[in-house]
């Protein structure tokens, strides 16, 4: 059995449950059953738990960048622009306009903390299940944040960084349409 846990799941929920973790602000998550809970007449246990990252166990990275850099235009998310490629080009153009490369952004991003209780929540899941984080963020942004959360398996995108200048020139999507 596989579950996808997300605060904004696009899949109709078939089962809801609560996870009681002290200090965790997100006490009720929607579990969407992706495969049947029973196989050959017997119940299966959950083997892999897949979580979204931003807004579930960590703050929205781009919104945090907007606040910490004082650039309101970076607050735009996929809720505002559903075409991810258009959104990323918009963000990268802003960073270029403001002269912000990876070396400037990295210390700002490194200071971002997981949501309160997130580490305990993830540890509780890992104690009984395999855990995978699926996110539309970037490896180049969330390395230190992943360490703070116990280094869960993460599938996300990559930024294209110019080695000489440190400028962000594009993104390499892990999976088209994600």
Image: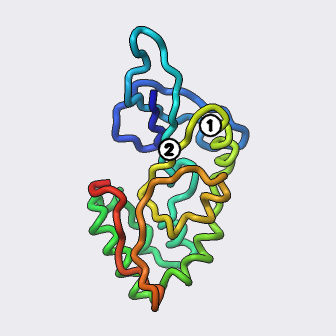
Q: Which corner quadrant of the image does residue 158 belong to?
A: bottom left
- Structural crowding at the residue carrying mark 2, measured as other residues with C-alpha within 10 Å and reported as few (<14), some (14–19) or many (≥20): many
- Vertical arrangement, residue 23 with respect to residue 40, above or below: below
Residue 55 x/y as whole percent: 51, 52
Residue 52 x/y as whole percent: 48, 48
The quarter of the image holding the C terminus is: bottom left
- Seen at 45% across and 54% down, the residue is 155
Viewer-proximal residue, 146 or 68? 146
Q: Kindly state the secondary structure of the residue where label 1 is placed.
A: helix
- Seen at 36% across and 80% down, the residue is 169
Which residue was labeled with disc 1?
125
- Structural crowding at the residue carrying mark 1, measured as other residues with C-alpha within 10 Å and reported as few (<14), some (14–19) or many (≥20): some
Which of the colour schemes (rainbow, by chain, secondary structure, one colour) is used?
rainbow
Residue at the limit of the structure toward the right, as seen here: 22
Q: What's the distance in space between the residues labelled 2 and 1, CA to CA?
A: 11 Å
Q: Which mark is residue 51?
A: 2
Residue 139 x/y as whole percent: 49, 65
Viewer-proximal residue, 40 or 90? 40
Q: Are marks 2 and 1 in contact (CB under 8 Å)?
A: yes
Q: Which mark is residue 74?
A: none
Residue 153 x/y as whole percent: 54, 50
The quarter of the image holding the N terminus is: top left
Q: Number of marks in the image?
A: 2
- Vertical arrangement, residue 21 with respect to residue 91, above or below: above
- Seen at 63% across and 43% down, the residue is 122
Residue at the limit of the structure toward the front, as seen here: 40
Q: Kindly state the secondary structure of the residue where label 2 is placed.
A: strand
Viewer-proximal residue, 118 or 149? 149
Q: Earlier in the sequence, mark 2 or mark 1?
A: 2
Tell me: 88 left or right of 15. Answer: left
- Seen at 66% across and 52% down, the residue is 150
């Amino acid at each position: 059995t596989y579950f996808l846990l997300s605060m904004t799941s696009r899949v109709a929920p078939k089962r809801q449950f609560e996870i009681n973790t002290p200090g965790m602000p997100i006490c009720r998550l929607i579990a969407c059953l992706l495969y049947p809970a029973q196989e050959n007449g017997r119940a299966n246990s959950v083997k892999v738990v897949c979580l979204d990252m931003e807004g579930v166990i960590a703050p929205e990275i781009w919104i945090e960048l907007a606040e910490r850099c004082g650039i309101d235009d970076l607050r735009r998310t996929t809720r505002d622009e559903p075409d991810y490629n258009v959104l990323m080009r918009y963000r990268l153009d802003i960073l270029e306009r403001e002269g912000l490369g990876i070396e400037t952004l990295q210390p700002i991003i490194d200071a971002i903390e997981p949501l309160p209780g997130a580490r305990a929540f993830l540890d509780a899941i890992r104690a009984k299940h395999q855990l995978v984080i699926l996110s539309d963020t970037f490896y180049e942004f969330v390395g230190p944040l992943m360490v703070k959360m116990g280094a869960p398996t993460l599938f996300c995108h990559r930024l294209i960084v110019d080695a000489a200048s440190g400028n962000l020139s594009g993104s390499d999507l892990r999976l088209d349409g994600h």
